[in-house]
Image (tube, coloured by chain):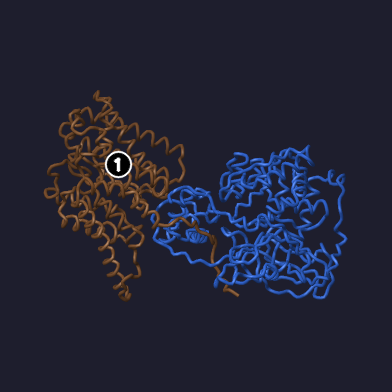
Chain colours: A brown, B blue
Amino acid sequence: MPKIIRKTSPYLRRPQASVTRMMRDVVIALIPVTLFAIYSFGLSALYILLASVLSMMITEYIYYQITDKMNGEKFKLKNESFTLYNFSAFTSGLIYGLTLPDSTPIWVAVMCGVLGILLAKLIFGGLGQNVFNPAAVARVLIVVNFATIVNYTEHVDSIAGATALTVTNVDLFSQAASTNYGLLNLFTGIGIPGSMGEVSVLLIVIGGIYLALRTSFEVRIPITYVITVFVLASVVALQKGLGIWYPVYHILSGGLFFGAVYMATDPVTSPITKPARIYFAFALGVITFFIRLFGALPEGVVFSILIMNMFVPAFDYFKWTNPRFSNKGNLIFASVIIITIGITMVGAYYVG
Amino acid sequence: MIKKSRKVRDYKELTKALPTLRYLEPEAVYIHLHNARCKTYDLFVKEGDKVTLGEIIGERHGGFFEQPIHSTISGTVGKVSKKLHRTGRKVDCIEIKNDFKETFHESVFDRTDNVIESLTQDDMVQILKEKSLVGLGGSGFPSYVKLATKEKIDTVVINAVECEPYLSSDYRLILEHPGRVIKGMKYIMQALSCKKGIIAIKSEKDPLYQVLTQVIKGRFPDLDIEVKRLGNHYPQGWEIEVFKWALGIDIPFGELPMKYGVIGFNVSTAVGVFDAIKHNLPVTKRYFTLTGDAIKFPQNFRVKVGTSVKKLIELSDGFKNEYDEVLVIMGGPMMGVSTVSCDVIVSKTTTSVIVLQNIDYEEEPCVRCGSCVYSCPAHLEPVQIMNAVKRNDKEVMKGLEAFRCIECGLCTYVCTSKIHVTDYIRKAKRLIG
């Protein structure tokens, strides 16, 4: 006679749902990008990736060993709050590593990796509690603190440094930039300088499709993000009489796809409802494009992600959050889009 | 898994195709004397009295209604004892020892079709009240109150969706007695003088569709009854979802469907209406599923109301030996109540007992994936309510309308981190009461 246990309903769980599966899928989706990075940048890429992944994982491990010790647990190799198994630190580390240029000194990568996961994730309380994306924070630490060390000697950069976009930023609306690196090359990533993981849009899209098929990320975020940048760039192109190359160039260059697919979609640092996720991605696109157009930096993906991470609780505030699209919400969103396009046109008039 | 997903694996293949096992002669039945809706009772018989099938042996007192208690077998009255009820609480139950004669009480008689055709709404309401018919899908709400509605009803919807996994009692009921379902429905339509009827089934239950359409075409060609095949998702059987998918009517929270010209009955209730009106009989038998992965022979039963589940488990050859810990669940595995022992009685509203192996799921931190928000059929935000419960922030719980939760359990089912979200929402509902 077995023992009868009392529990509360429901008694079933969806078998395939697990955090590990979700995080592991991100790693699998990153494999082509990683291999391409090692192929184009050689062994130095491998060392930087290893350094960034290991620094984040070891930091998390040591941090939890210390907190467990403080809570009076005995030392165990696999400690009580062991979280490495669910790939979350590994994913952050890999994404962070792939946003680095290949000339990054190892010690810089390690230092910022450690600080990134510690400041952005662990002191907030670990997985699920962080406000900011750890990979983005680590990357920004490098941009802000080590800008002179980590520069792009022979190439031009990406996510937050100087990309192919630097050229555009200097000479904002000239087609010369796009002739330097053909659009097709930008798409496939062959022969394009920049951060290790961000050069090949093709492989990033393949990874994104895999994630979408496995439903391991919110596909609305990258789509809205890229479309927003494309539309705003098209508005500028129309105003200035530039060709279709201008918006296409904008979305293909400078880590936009990488940021949109792998960083903006981090569920912990994005809003919780369907409409809010679309508004969030729209805001990301607007901020990215405004930084590119008006800002001092040629690139704004990481900064826009960090800025919008701060507003996630505002999107989810209980007084206006709504899991469904409402007429009122759609109306407000439509007016915001129109206002944004207006601002873009006025701004572009002065920039040009 | 970040997606709206309302697909729940249904496990119905365990019992769906099995013919119903008739177990109508138990040695004794235990009839519960009070329940969640009726707190007090009067007993009209004492130990040693002889009772007959269909005789009134007592009366339950609810908040605004009285409910006669009927004997479901003929025999001798025994002692009053405490037994577990569907709600998971111990209730007073009266034992009736079977004399295996099946003597009917004199109140049980057949009405001819002519008599039935002359019955008005008030007559039928009176009959259902005397026969204490309640919603047999599990709600236990008195059916006569529903039938006595003064609103103009355009459509009667019979809910045969049975969206909970594992359950197949309604399925077998329709397959074996489609005529009774449709006749019961005909009486309801007659009482409400409404012309249109809809039977809602899941689209994957094709045999039901074929049986029902054939019976309607062959035996009731003059009735305007449509069999609607609804989606296969959970909780399709929730009344609001049924109306939405079958008729396209969106009923806002807190409003009665009668206001919108529709009324819903469970398929077992329709059969109950048939028995009450045609044979003047209370609910004495019901279809009952005993299933689950920890029972040796899952089976559909046709049992007397009041049969002990322990006996039925014995008939199914008991629990499987390989599991040390099992859950005994009354009702479906998504919304049912788990009990501490198998000494349970089959009440009128018990559709099933499910015995599952006990799996302790390891909870991981919430990664805010949003699956629960996407999947919630009531359009709530379970994860945010959960966080509010953790902070004990009642304002937020109210603002997020936690009281609208129907406790379907889908948020827990889909949770990526295997967190028991539904429990937190229940707590929120209690806190904001």
Out of B130 and B16, give the one closest to the viewer: B16
Q: Residue at x 37, y 33 (%)?
A: A335
Q: Tell me if residue B389 comes above or below residue B200 in the rendering.
A: below
Disc 1: which chain? A
Q: Which residue is mark 1?
A: A257
Asked if residue B317 can be seen in this view, the reply is yes
- Above or below: residue B296 compared with residue B378: below
Tell me if A28 is positioned left or right of B409 in this view.
left
> Which residue is drawn at the image coordinates 28% and 32% (left, top)?
A248
Q: From where the camera sits, is residue B141 visible?
A: no
In the rendered image, residue B142, in percent from the top left (x then y), is placed at 70, 55
Q: Is A131 on the left or on the right of B228, as rendered? A: left
Residue B67: % across, % down: 74, 60
Amino acid type, mark 1: Phe
Tally of numbered tags:
1
Name the foreground residue: B415 vs A193. Answer: A193
* Residue A329 percent coordinates (x, y): 42, 39
On the image, the x and y values in percent for residue A180 come to: 18, 32
Q: Is residue A10 left or right of residue B194?
A: left
- Say what secondary structure mark 1 lies in: helix
